[in-house]
Image (spheres, rainbow, N blue to C red):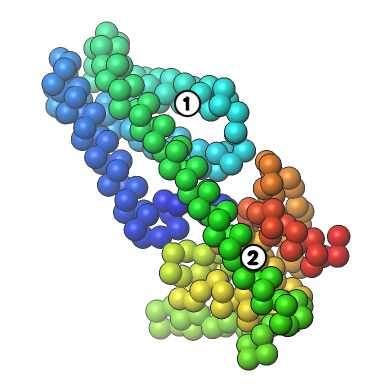
Amino acid sequence: MFDHPFTRSMAGRTAGILLVLAAIGVLSGLLTLYTSLCFTTALADAALYVASLAVAGYYSWYLSPYIKVWQAQVGIALVTQFLCLAIAEAVTIASSLESAETFLSGVPLHLLLGIPVWIILLQWYRLLEGKEREAEQLEVGQRVAESLHQPVDSPPASAEVLDRISVKEGTRIHLISTDELLCIQANGDYATLTTAYGQYVKEQTMKYFETHLPADTFVRIHRSSIVNVNHILRVELFGKDTYQIRLTGGTTLRASATGYRLLKARLGL
């Protein structure tokens, strides 16, 4: 499960929902003004198209690091627009909301909104990836500097090594053994702890877990992921300088090139 900018925090989720609603409002307004559709039909048409585009845009985050050739990017953009239009047309015509002729008259308006939105979304993804790489390189540099003053395989002298983690959930307190912990993923100001029995959210930083978990068992493979090496099933190359880590239970994580090097060193490969 890769860390998505629209789901990693409440602010991201809220922004995503507001953007989708705004796009539906703009497109339905254009369709009402410049076609013969009534507002209700235009709203349904716009909601179907924008919802399809939003789903495609969401999953494009996972593909963007691996598709660098501009011809492929253009091809994916065209196919995406075609599929979203086809979905909206099929549903509206099948439900008798509008005729094929009426829908086709509004296609230019769909593309007038959809193509710029798609381009802006991909450029934003690319900007975020660049910032994450810079932050990761800075963090690696800090870790290297710290390692000059202490052995790599041992935590800071003042850090307590955890053998279990307590998580409060309502009136219950869960005690999670580090042996049962599959991975930890950043989730805004919180961290999501994944075990074979479920997921738990704890208000703690990734840096804390990195310095307090057993160094011979846990590796930070990405700025947003720490993995228990005892639960790794396989490691796969998944694009240039990016690796996919599959864990027991089906959880999948993304490892950066730097995280992969740390993992190889820990596994002695």
Binning the other alpha carbons within 10 Å of mark 2 as few (below 14), some (14 to 19) or many (20 upward) gives some
Q: Position of residue 117 (x, y in %)?
A: 36, 33
> Residue 122 placed where, x, y %?
46, 37
- Which quadrant of the rendered structure holds the C terminus? bottom right
Q: Name the residue at 53% across, 49% down.
A: 130
Type of the residue with mark 1: Ala
Q: Is residue 194 above or below residue 233?
A: below
Residue 181 visible in image: no
Describe the element under mark 1 as helix, strand or loop: helix
Q: Quadrant of residue 62?
A: top right
Please name which of the two marks, 2 or 1, marks the residue nearer to the observer: 2
Image coordinates for residue 106, horizontal then vertical, percent: 26, 16
Rendered location of residue 137, percent (x, y): 61, 59
What residue sits 80% from the left and 65% below the top?
Answer: 265
Distance of label 2 from label 1 (alpha carbons): 35 Å
- Which residue reaches farthest bottom? 158
In the figure, is residue 37 to the left or right of 199?
A: left
- Compare residues 26 and 179 and report the one nearer the observer: 26
Graded by Cα atoms within 10 Å as few (under 14), some (14 to 19) or many (20 or more), the crowding at tag 1 reads some
Residue 91 quadrant: top left
Q: Which residue is mark 1?
A: 77
At mark 2, the secondary structure is helix
In this rendering, position of residue 140 left or right of residue 50: right
Name the residue that disc number 2 marks.
140
Q: Amino acid at mark 2?
A: Val
In the rendered structure, the answer to whether residue 204 lies left or right of residue 51 reads: right
Q: Is residue 185 above or below residue 211?
A: above
